[in-house]
Image (cartoon, grey):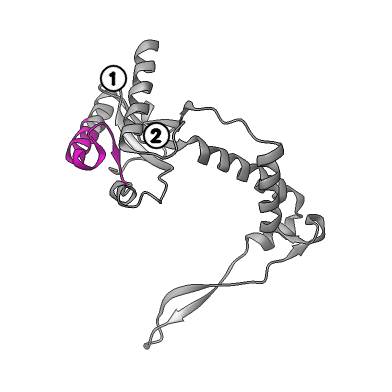
């Protein structure tokens, strides 16, 4: 998207500045209508998912204009299944992380690289060094990530977090109004995204 001040919320811009960004987005949507359908803009390689139906399109960042000519929306859209998996993972990760000491956390976060040098002795890239994973008594002899995987299965089966489809406003975005959309769909498609946008804008108009 167009460059913008990362530290200035979109809502704090003047209406003139906001309208300019809306017009720019409308033009971008129009130019990409053959790919995105004409209601939103998305950097995602949509054609890849059309050509590979076994690859599930479950998450994307989309941009669409609002009901007001000075409003645009910067939205994360995600399937309910992936949102559930993310919630389970976050809970398991946070639980495991809290069980480690500060020193153990530093070790888990640490990574090592080795430089790759060309024929002239110049470093051209780095390769991540694989380290042996540490097993912990507090995890029953499992490594950090093995314990997380174990807890994910337990949480999903016995402590499943509630995931609600719908819309969540995310304040403070520098480009557009922030929004999270959770949809009840097996996968994202252009029609699914368009339906979610249409439903959201209808709710916005009803509230206004």
Regarding mark 2 in the picture, which secondary structure is present there?
strand
For marks 1 and 2 on the same chain, the one whose residue lies earlier in the sequence: 1
Q: Position of residue 52 (x, y in %)?
A: 34, 52
Q: Which residue matches tag 2?
A: 75
Q: Is residue 163 above or below residue 112?
A: above
Residue 166 as seen in the image, left or right of residue 203: right
- Residue 153 percent across, percent down from the top left: 67, 47
Which residue is under mark 1? Answer: 68
Residue 99, image x and y in percent? 76, 50
Q: Which mark is residue 53?
A: none
| Image location (x, y in percent) of residue 137 | 82, 60
Bounds of the magenta segment:
23-43
Q: Residue furthest front?
A: 54
Q: Is residue 35 left or right of residue 123?
A: left
The question of residue 40 being in magenta is answered with yes
Asked if residue 160 lies left or right of residue 172, the reply is right
Observer-nearest of 125 and 81:
81
């Amino acid at each position: 998207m167009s460059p913008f001040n990362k530290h200035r919320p979109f809502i704090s811009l003047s209406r003139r500045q906001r309208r300019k960004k809306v017009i720019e987005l409308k033009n971008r949507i129009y130019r990409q209508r053959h790919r995105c359908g004409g209601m939103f803009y998305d950097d995602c390689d949509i054609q890849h998912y059309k050509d590979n139906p076994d690859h599930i399109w479950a998450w994307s960042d989309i941009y669409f204009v609002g009901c007001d000519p000075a409003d645009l929306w910067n939205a994360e859209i995600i399937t309910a299944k992936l949102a559930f998996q993310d919630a389970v993972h976050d809970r398991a990760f946070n639980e495991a992380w809290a069980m480690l000491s500060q020193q153990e956390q530093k070790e888990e976060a640490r990574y090592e690289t080795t430089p790759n040098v060309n024929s002239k002795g110049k470093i051209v890239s780095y390769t991540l060094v694989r380290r042996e994973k540490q097993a912990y008594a507090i995890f029953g002899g499992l490594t950090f990530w093995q314990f997380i995987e174990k807890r994910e299965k337990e949480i999903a089966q016995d402590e499943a977090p509630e995931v609600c489809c719908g819309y969540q406003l995310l304040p403070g975005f520098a480009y557009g109004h922030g929004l999270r959309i959770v949809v009840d769909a097996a996968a994202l498609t252009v029609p699914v995204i368009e339906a979610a946008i249409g439903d959201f804008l209808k709710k916005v108009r009803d509230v206004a």
